[in-house]
Image: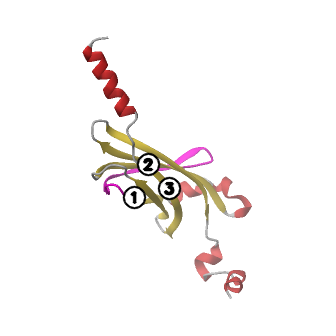
Amino acid sequence: MDILEKAKNFVSEKVANMPTPEATITDVDLKGFGLDGITLLAKICVSNPYSVAIPIGEIVYTVKSAGKGIVSGSIPDPGSLKANDKTMLEVTVKVPHSAVVSLARDIGGDWDIDYLLELGLIVDLPVIGNFTIPMSYAGEMKLPTFSDLFMGKSEPEKEAEK
C-alpha cells in the first residue's frame, strides 16, 4: 500500500467518525387559520458539536397526507447554528385551502387531517460540504368547526374551562 492510499484511508476514517449536528422536531402547532390557508409552526432543536458556528444553507419541507404531497417549499439562508450549543429554529409552513379541501375524504367524522411533515436542514460543514439532516413529524391537524369560526368556543368547551 503506497503512501497516498494510506493518507486517503486515514482521511476517510476521520471524516466517517466526525460528529455531525443533530436535529429533532420538538413540536408542530397550528399557528393560524385565515383566508389564505392554514399556517403550521414547526419548532426544531438543533445541536452543534463544533466549536464554531455553522451556517444553515436552507431548510426544505414537505407536508404529506394520505400518502400525497400537499405542499412543499424551502426557506433560504435561515441563519446559523450556535457553536457548542443547541439552537431553536421555527419553521412556518403555509398550507393553502385548496390543498386542505382536496383532503376532504381524510377528514371524516373526527374533523382532523393526519399529516406527515418532512424537513431537511441543509448545513455547510467544513471539509464535508453540504450535509442534510433529515427529520419527520407525524401528527394531526384539528380543523376548526363552523361554530369555532363564527361564534368562538362551543358551550361544552366553555364549561370545561371553568
Q: What element carries label 3?
A: strand
Quarter of the figure that contains the N terminus: top left
Where residue 105 appears, x then y in whole percent? Answer: 68, 53
Front-lying residue, 87 or 104? 87
Q: Does residue 151 sit above or below 30 in this rendering?
A: below
Amino acid on which disc 2 is placed? Glu
Q: In this view, does 151 lie to the left or right of 45?
A: right
Q: What element carries label 2?
A: strand
Residue stretch in magenta? 64-87
Amino acid on which disc 1 is placed? Lys
Q: Give the number of the mark in front: 3 or 2.
A: 2
Q: Magenta region's main secondary structure?
A: strand
Residue under the point 30% across and 22% down: 8
N-terminal of the pair, mark 1 or mark 3, is 3
Q: Give me the C-alpha separation between circle 1 and circle 3.
A: 13 Å
Q: Which mark is residue 86?
A: 1
Q: Residues within 10 Å of mark 1 (few under 14, many from 20)?
A: some
| Contact? badges 2 and 1 (CB < 8 Å) | no
Q: Which mark is residue 22?
A: 2
Total number of numbered discs in the rendering: 3
Where residue 132 appears, x then y in whole percent? Answer: 40, 42
Front-lying residue, 65 or 36? 65
Residue identified by numbered label 3: 25
Q: Give me the C-alpha separation between circle 2 and circle 1.
A: 9 Å
Q: Does residue 81 sit above or below 110 in this rendering?
A: above
Q: Residue 125 carries which label?
A: none
Residue under the point 45% across and 58% down: 44
Give residue 151's quadrant in the image: bottom right
Amino acid on which disc 3 is placed? Ile
